Image (spheres, rainbow, N blue to C red):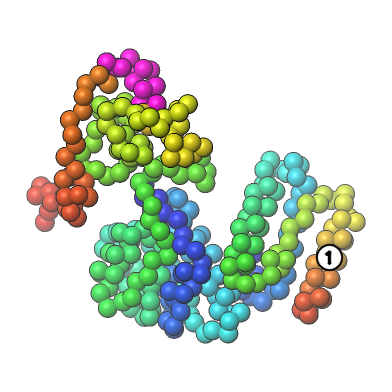
Amino acid sequence: MIVAERKPFDEIYEMVKGYDTVLVLGCGTCVTVCMAGGEKEVGVLSSAIRLANKKNNITQDIIEDTIERQCDREFFDKVKKKIKAADAVLSMACGVGVQFCSEVFEGTRVLPALNTTFYGTTENQGVWSERCAGCGECVLDDFGGICPIARCSKSLLNGPCGGSQNGKCEVDPENIDCAWQLIYDRMKLLGMLDKLEVNQAVKDWNTARDGGPRKIVREDVTL
Amino acid sequence: MILKCLEEGYEGILILACPLDNCKYVRGNYRAQKRVDAVKKILDDIGIERESVQIEFVSSLDSHKVAEAINGMKAYLAKRGAKG
């Protein structure tokens, strides 16, 4: 899923200043799972803005709603009227949702309440970590299901660097595992260490962000 | 829920939870403590006194502690000039 975290309150409060009616719009998919922008978080942020307004004697209508997804057009139907009536939408979706909302409702100011961070997994309740960098050419079959691009700080494809100590990465030894230690251990477990003897060719980063904004068109499913 | 109460004009909220390590839901009171801490952080951001929300861990046998907690909150509100 896409993992995000809420921006600091001060930053958000500054953004919504001056708008008479603000719709705080949550997203029911990834950011609900990572507890950053779902219905509950919409309620908390809306309350915080209302309380701050009360304290500062500011009159502002804060309206709340959450749709299933902000990255698909059809889900906006439910809140179309609310969006059009609002002076600004404070979107609690990921960067995709914020942009798409802004695209669907071109004349509306759409503001981001979250910092979109990575594609990741829930390690434990309240703990999320990165797993995929969306490079566009998956190499997980060569590395036992552990991605050296997303999980190695240097995205190395041919073994660890000198900064690997006791299974940890020198970038942050307390919090970052050395991806190459993980890869080695996994390949050993799978009985596939010989596969690591194969030199990986230089990666073509054209399929990643380096090739510019990406787009997929599937003729078999287009209308 | 806590923020909603504040929004509705309640100036102080006292949450009474079971004693730590003695919760029917095992860790429910620890989780409640974390939620209250999170709310206090929000109050800091807004500039509202964090003492507006308090949590105490008491059992049904601790009537004196319950009274102490309630009187403590009343005293705090009186000090703030709010209606107790």
- For the record, the magenta segment spans A181-195
Judged from the image, the secondary structure of the residue bearing numbered disc 1 is helix
**Left or right: B19 as drawn, with respect to A159:** right
- Residue B62 part of the magenta-drawn span: no
Q: Nearer the viewer, residue A201 or B36?
A: A201
Residue A132 visible in rendering: yes
Residue at the image position 39 percent from the left and 42 percent from the top: A130
Residue displayed at 52% across by 85% down:
A59
Badge 1 crowding class, 10 Å Cα cut-off, few under 14, some 14 to 19, many 20 or more, is: some
Instruction: Specify whether A65 is left or right of A213.
Output: right
Question: At which x and y percent is residue A106?
Answer: 25, 74
Chain that bears disc 1:
B
Q: Is residue A1 above or below residue B51?
A: above
Q: Residue at x 75, y 45 (%)?
A: B20
Give coordinates of residue A183: x percent, y percent: 35, 26
Q: Hey, what amino acid is under mark 1?
A: Gly
Image position of A5 (left or right of A184):
right
Q: Residue at label 1?
A: B72
